[in-house]
Image (spheres, grey):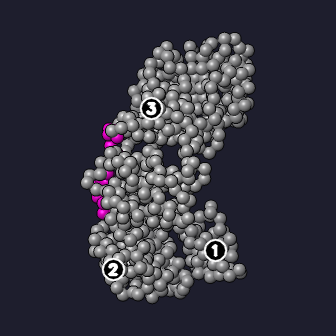
């Protein structure tokens, strides 16, 4: 019987692999491998169909991974250049996406390919072996033996660079000794070997990871920076209070509040309207404009290994006798791998207390060397952000619904809602119940009421409130436009702005709701909510007798919106809600 594979013309498949949404069948594998053998296009450049075909192979359903690996390995045995090296890279990528049983043939083939006559294949195999997570100590030792053995057989610097990378990922003290000798005596391989020894050191140190100790204090007031959603800065300042000496308008820009910490670190990490907290470093010295990455690396390392930075690291880290682990993050975006490695190598020379580890770290060193966030003297902004601790602030939120409120937005809404012991507060779009839990944490109230037309949301909100043991709270499955809770003094909510709206647009729903809210609130009652089209809602709220008392233009994580606080006037011409009710999709 003729295989269906041959029913698909090569040109047709070549066009389809360029579509990221195309998921090939396992029967398409032979034709995809044929595409990977293409050399140059009509312009003399490497044919893009080669990369497209490789990515397409990786999209074949995972249930067929064993068959895919078998097919690729079979093709590799007969392949010629340049396909042979490409298949080596493909096998390496396949070897890390399945179970040990599924990928064992690929792992064994990669080890045998280290000594292959094709240089591109053996280097692809070496790099792939470094990316594997060995399934046992025996496998790790076997990979290392193969690499160390071939090191002495080859005179190729390119081979040894690929082996150094792999040994850095999985190597032992024996591999480290070899690499350290090369780093000291071989100028052409020195940088690569130093990077590999750093990788071995940090992997061995992971046996004992440090942690951030929130109960510790610095011993004197120290500058601290709170990061929040853009537009919530004033609310963070209110939560902090005067004792923190907070102010807005730092060199870090929108979404930050500067303050002073004169208490255990736990006090800072407990601020509910902040995303996270960091320690901005003072510049070591006035900095001339960096001419290259070498100058910039020296500046960064001088700051992060200076007296104040090291005092911060030591004070708040329990190392267990090991090095303090950190990773670099670049505020301008991107990995900037060359600069990261240069900085890591300089840190290793400057101090024995720190080690760069991009995957398991207790600190993040955030560097901003771009744009208008430099201070007035041109210094590069560096901030130490503690990460090695559990954040218990929102542990009550066991489950979410689609488009649930971000936790700090819910905390901000709760802080702006009425705070009296006699208040009855309603969240008409309760979702996961986060706003009601946050309000309950702030102090006494008479009752909390939540409604949602989605039965699943009602169930989840009840579970989250129960998790925090919130009292005097009831959650109903009901339509916000027709539900009429009695005695409501405050409404706080983050209404739906997408699929959960149902028929009509979110603006139409919110316009109708604001009229209903005005009818439900007594004089002086408060509506606190977030809306995406502020001027349209402002006009409708004003007409309904709910003028704006405060407003905050906030970043919703991809689009702007406005947080409004409305206060009902003593007299109002209330426009009642009309039109069809809105259903969940």
Disc 1/disc 2 C-alpha distance (Å): 36 Å
- Residue 148 marker: 2
**Residue at the image position 66 percent from the left and 11 percent from the top:** 570
Q: Is residue 82 visible?
A: yes
Give residue 181's position: percent from left, percent from top.
32, 77
Mark 3, secondary structure of its residue: helix
Q: Which residue lies under the disc numbered 1?
A: 49
Of the image marks 3 and 1, the number of the one nearer the N terminus: 1
**Residue at the image position 66 percent from the left and 23 percent from the top:** 548
Q: Nearer the viewer, mark 3 or mark 1?
A: 3
Q: How many marks?
A: 3
Q: Which residues are magenta?
A: 203-218
In what quadrant of the picture does the N terminus appear?
bottom right
Mark 2, secondary structure of its residue: helix
Instruction: Assess whether residue 445 is covered by the magenta stretch.
Output: no
Disc 3/disc 1 C-alpha distance (Å): 59 Å
In what quadrant of the picture does the C terminus appear?
top right
**Residue at the image position 38 percent from the left and 71 percent from the top:** 194
Of the image marks 1 and 2, the number of the one nearer the N terminus: 1
Residue 264 figure quarter:
top left
Left or right? Give the position of 436 relative to 305.
Answer: right
Mark 1 neighbour class, 10 Å CA radius: few under 14, some 14 to 19, many 20 or more: many
Mark 1, secondary structure of its residue: helix
Residue 34 figure quarter:
bottom right
Disc 2/disc 3 C-alpha distance (Å): 57 Å
Q: Which residue lies under the disc numbered 3?
A: 244
Give residue 123's position: percent from left, percent from top.
45, 79
Give residue 83's position: percent from left, percent from top.
55, 82
């Amino acid at each position: 019987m003729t295989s269906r594979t041959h029913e698909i013309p090569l040109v047709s498949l070549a066009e389809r692999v360029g579509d990221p949404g195309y998921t090939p069948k396992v029967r398409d594998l032979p034709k995809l491998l044929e595409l990977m053998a293409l050399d140059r296009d009509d312009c003399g450049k490497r044919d893009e169909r080669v990369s497209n075909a490789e990515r397409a192979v990786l999209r074949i359903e995972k249930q067929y991974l064993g068959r895919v690996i078998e097919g690729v390995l079979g093709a590799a045995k007969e392949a010629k250049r340049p396909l042979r090296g490409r298949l080596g890279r493909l096998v390496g990528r396949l070897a890390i996406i399945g179970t040990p049983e599924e990928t064992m043939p690929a792992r064994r083939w990669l080890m045998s390919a280290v000594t292959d006559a094709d240089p591109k294949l053996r280097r692809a195999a070496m790099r792939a072996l470094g990316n594997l997570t060995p399934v046992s100590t025996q496998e790790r030792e076997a990979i290392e033996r193969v690499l160390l053995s071939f090191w002495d057989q080859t005179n190729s610097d390119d081979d040894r660079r690929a082996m150094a990378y792999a040994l850095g990922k999985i190597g032992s003290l024996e591999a480290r000794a070899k690499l350290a000798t090369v780093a000291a005596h071989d100028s052409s391989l020195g940088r690569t070997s130093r990077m590999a020894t750093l990788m071995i050191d940090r992997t061995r140190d992971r046996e004992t990871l440090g942690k951030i100790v929130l109960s510790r204090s610095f011993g004197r007031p120290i500058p601290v920076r709170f990061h929040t959603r853009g537009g919530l800065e004033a609310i963070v300042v209110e939560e902090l209070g005067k004792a923190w000496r907070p102010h807005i308008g730092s060199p870090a820009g929108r979404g930050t509040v500067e303050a002073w910490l004169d208490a255990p670190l736990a006090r800072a990490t407990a601020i509910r309207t902040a995303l996270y907290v960091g320690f901005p470093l003072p510049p070591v010295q006035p900095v001339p404009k960096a001419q290259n990455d070498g100058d910039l690396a020296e500046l960064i390392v001088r700051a992060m290994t200076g007296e104040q930075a090291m005092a911060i690291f030591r004070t708040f880290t329990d190392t267990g006798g090991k090095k303090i682990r950190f990773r670099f993050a670049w505020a301008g975006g991107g990995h900037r791998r060359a600069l990261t490695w240069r900085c890591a190598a300089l840190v290793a020379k400057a101090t024995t207390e720190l080690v760069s580890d991009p995957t398991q770290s207790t600190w993040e060193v955030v560097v901003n060397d771009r744009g208008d966030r430099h201070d007035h003297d041109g210094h590069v902004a560096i901030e130490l952000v503690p990460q090695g601790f559990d954040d218990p602030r929102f542990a009550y939120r066991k489950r979410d619904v689609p488009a649930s409120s971000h936790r700090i937005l819910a905390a901000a809404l709760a802080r702006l809602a009425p705070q009296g012991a006699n208040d009855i507060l309603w969240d008409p779009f309760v979702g996961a119940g986060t706003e009601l839990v946050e309000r309950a944490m702030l102090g006494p109230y008479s009752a909390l009421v939540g409604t949602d037309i989605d039965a699943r949301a009602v169930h989840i909100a009840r579970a989250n409130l129960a998790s925090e043991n919130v009292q005097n709270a009831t959650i109903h499955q009901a339509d916000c436009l027709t539900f009429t809770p009695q005695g409501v003094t405050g409404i706080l909510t983050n209404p739906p702005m997408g699929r959960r709206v149902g028929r009509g647009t979110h603006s139409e729903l919110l316009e109708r709701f604001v009229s209903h809210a005005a009818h439900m609130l007594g004089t002086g009652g408060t509506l606190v909510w977030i809306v995406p089209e502020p001027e349209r809602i402002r006009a409708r709220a004003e007409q309904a007798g709910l003028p704006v008392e405060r407003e905050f233009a906030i970043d919703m994580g991809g689009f702007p919106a406005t947080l409004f606080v409305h206060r009902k006037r003593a007299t109002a011409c209330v426009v009642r809600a009309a039109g069809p009710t809105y259903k969940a999709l």
